[in-house]
Image (tube, rainbow, N blue to C red):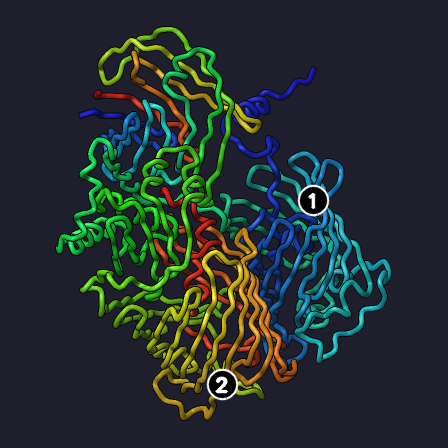
Amino acid sequence: MPILRAVIAARGADAYLTISDTKGDVVTWSTTDRTTFTLRDGVLIQTRGLGPDLMSAQAPTLGALRTDGSKYQRIYFLLGADDRSTRRTYDCTVSVGGQEVIEVFGRSHRVTHVTESCSRPQDSIANEFWIEGSVIRKSRQLASGGAGFIDFEQVVD
Amino acid sequence: MLHLPRHLTAALALCTTLCAGPVMAEMTKSLNLNGATGLIDMPSGEMQDDAAFSFSIANAGPMTRATIAFQFSERLSASFRFHTWRDWNELAPADPEKYSDRSFDIRYQVLEEGRYLPSLTIGMIDFSGEGLLSSEYVAATKSFGDRVKVTAGLGWGRLGSNGGIGQLFGARPPLAESDKDKPNIDQWFRGEAAPFAGVEVKLTDRWTFKGEYSSDAYVLEESRGIVDRNSPFNFGFEYQKGPNTRYGIYSLYGSEVGLVFHMILDPKNRSTGGVMGAAPVPVKARPSRASDPDAYDGGWVTQSDAGPLLRKNLAKRLAVDGITIENMAFTAKTVEVRIRSGRIDAGAQAIGRVARALSHVMPASVETFEIVPVVNGLGASKVTIKRSDLEALEYAADNATLLRSRVLFGDSGPVPDYALGTEDLYPKFRWSLKPGLRMAEPLKGDFGARLSASYDMQPGLVFSGSVYGRIYGNVPGATGPSSSVLPHVRSDGGLYSTNSEIALERLTMAWFARPAPNLYSRVSFGYLERMHAGVSGELLWKPVESSLALGAELNYSKQRNTDGMFGFDEYDYDVVTGHISAYYDFGNGYLGQVDVGRYLAGDVGATISFDRVFVNGWRVGAFATLTDVSASDFGEGSFDKGIRFSVPLSWALGNESKSTFGAALRSGGGDGGARLEVDGRLYDSIRDYHGGALDSEWARVWR
């Protein structure tokens, strides 16, 4: 059974998620108390149940993340404390780093470290991905202003 | 080369990742003893953040001020204050020991602070009362860096009573007895003008020093011998505890100590950062028509058990979200489901949950989902969603906007003939026992327990009632009828409280119906409210997507006994009342309403009200009623005016709940301009499911 680990530092939360829905390349992962994280090819596009949630996103494809220097617009559609949809638009650039060996749940993986640097007039963020072949083995991705970044690890494929 | 201190560069670096606002930290826009934005006793040129709702309780020597203030828009704020003077009889033993007055303030910011220009605000304090606090002012505030703010201003009335520089706009006429409790227009900005000034210094993140030169001579209090004003200078310290509370302690006028506590709430934002609650079930994708054409065959509709089975499956899925099915009607291509949502506080979210549940339950041939939210047995609107849009947009960027552009809002129409009602839904008995609170003014009121029950006999026909038992109250009891010369339709409220520890508040039969498209009707009969019983009929015209609604109400009522029981012999009073109403949704949550008609005391006039409603359900508004009753007959307050607010518990707790807490605070307890308090008035019942409200919360359709 595939298992994804999600750590939300800002919440002190650490959970192992199982698949609750699959539609093509989009997989929704759920905690036992039905907080869900939806990823397209490993790239976070939605969360539900965090409070400040990522309602939808215009996010890069896995292909774009594997291409050094690719540039695109990333848009987060957030539902925040005001119960309204807030849009955050960033201009992003991918930089593909070197090979690394990382350890996930006691097993070593040879991965490529990818950094996605995004900026808008108000602020800058960076999402990070550790890609093994065509699988995002590990990542650190922004969910929302309130929940901050989430660290994902694909523990069991 | 510019060298920045190390901690500042660190702060800037941090801000590039976390802060969304301006880089320079702003000083808090603090409040004064009057609960208005300002220094200690003096106002300033600043405003609170848009929508800030504050509650302040201040003790300044022998005076207590309790104030509720609301930042109605970015530039306009208003407050309601309850002011008590103790030892009022110090020099006049015949007078009461305490004297109380209610007052309204209004402030408008003419100029926002710029790089060189200060913020500039014009304000009026107690602009329509007895005039004990009446003042007008112009105040300017400029900040220097992020630690120092300087304010200077000019005051009239009380704020022009010390150190006047002359009468700029002529003499200030005394307030005629007949003009009390009305907007005292003749006095505004008249008489002696006097300057005031002050400074605010932020010492640490939490501590602030304030000092001011006051232009208020405290003439009234000195003449009563309760304040010994030795100096125009006030100073003190304030302590900010978290974003919501602030304390202050001051030396006032060289002789008194001032203490203040402010609670500042942000109705726009939930304290939990967003609405909590479990994730929805994902949309169930249908197989493609090419891969499984048989799945799209509509033959299933002819199966006799299809209806009950589908309804049972849908009910099971909706129960998780506290949604019940009133009716379900389907063809091979379309399903209409009428739902009642008991828990989720946003209509759009409830609709989204129903749509997803339908995607799991309905056979693939059903392409159109028609969802009708039901309130008091009435279809409030109909939201039509194409199933293929739901499937296509679930994971699309900006899915809420895209879905909204493909969804239709319309009139619910009648229940289809072939609808399957739910047998066990009617008749339905429900009851609850909850703590109840009745607020008469800030910090005054009573709390007790309220036992409510309702019996839904069939859709739209409800028999219901409630009993309230007082446990504790601090409103002084009334010993006899009020001295009002009008029929005592409201002014004996104290007697009703005193004479009934336990009272039957309501016991009514109500019938809600949809006589025609866009029309809603209500007839209520019985013990309508705590002081009056009778019959009330209402008709409302409100197209789902219209900003305008029109209504008419006609009532006949008799006044009830003060013991809260069934009798009518204490008052021999009955009256026909009625109103024509117009409601308008100005957008962005601003609602206006005008009612013209006959009020309970037989007086004729009009009520104007204006409310601001937030997406999360917070509501704050003001109202005023003018009728043909003379001001002297009306009693204190002269005409009925006040503010009202309603706070959803889900805002504070972040959970899914429709419970609210609220109150209306009035300038007086007069008998003029009073209306029956009837449950289930139509506009507010159905508005949540109409265009303006659904659109404002539409982002939650995918929540």
Determine which quarter of the picture holds residue B156: bottom right
Residue situated in front as seen by the camera: B80 or A150:
A150
Q: In the rendering, at what x and y percent does residue B579 appear?
A: 52, 76
Q: Is residue B280 above or below residue B550?
A: above
Q: Residue at x 33, y 77 (%)?
A: B509
The answer to whether residue A95 is left or right of residue B629 is left
| Chain of the residue displaying label 1 | B
Distance in Å between CA atoms under marks 2 and 1: 50 Å
Q: Secondary structure at mark 1?
A: loop
Residue situated in front as seen by the camera: B662 or B152:
B662
Q: Where is the N terminus of chain B found, in terms of image quarters?
A: top right
Q: In the rendering, at what x and y percent does residue B291 appear?
A: 21, 31
Q: Earlier in the sequence, mark 2 or mark 1?
A: 1
Picture disc at residue B576: 2
Q: Residue at x 48, y 23 (%)?
A: A125
Are there few (<14), some (14-19), or many (20+) residues within 10 Å of tag 1?
A: some
Q: In the rendering, at what x and y percent does residue B326 appear?
A: 26, 61
The answer to whether residue B423 is left or right of residue B390 is left
| Chain of the residue displaying label 2 | B
Q: Are marks 2 and 1 on the same chain?
A: yes
Judging by the rendered image, the residue that carries numbered circle 1 is: B112
Amino acid found under the numbered disc labelled 2: Val
Determine which quarter of the picture holds residue A19: top left
Picture disc at residue A149: none
Residue situated in front as seen by the camera: B7 or B439:
B439
Amino acid found under the numbered disc labelled 1: Glu
Q: In the rendering, at what x and y percent does residue B113 appear?
A: 70, 42
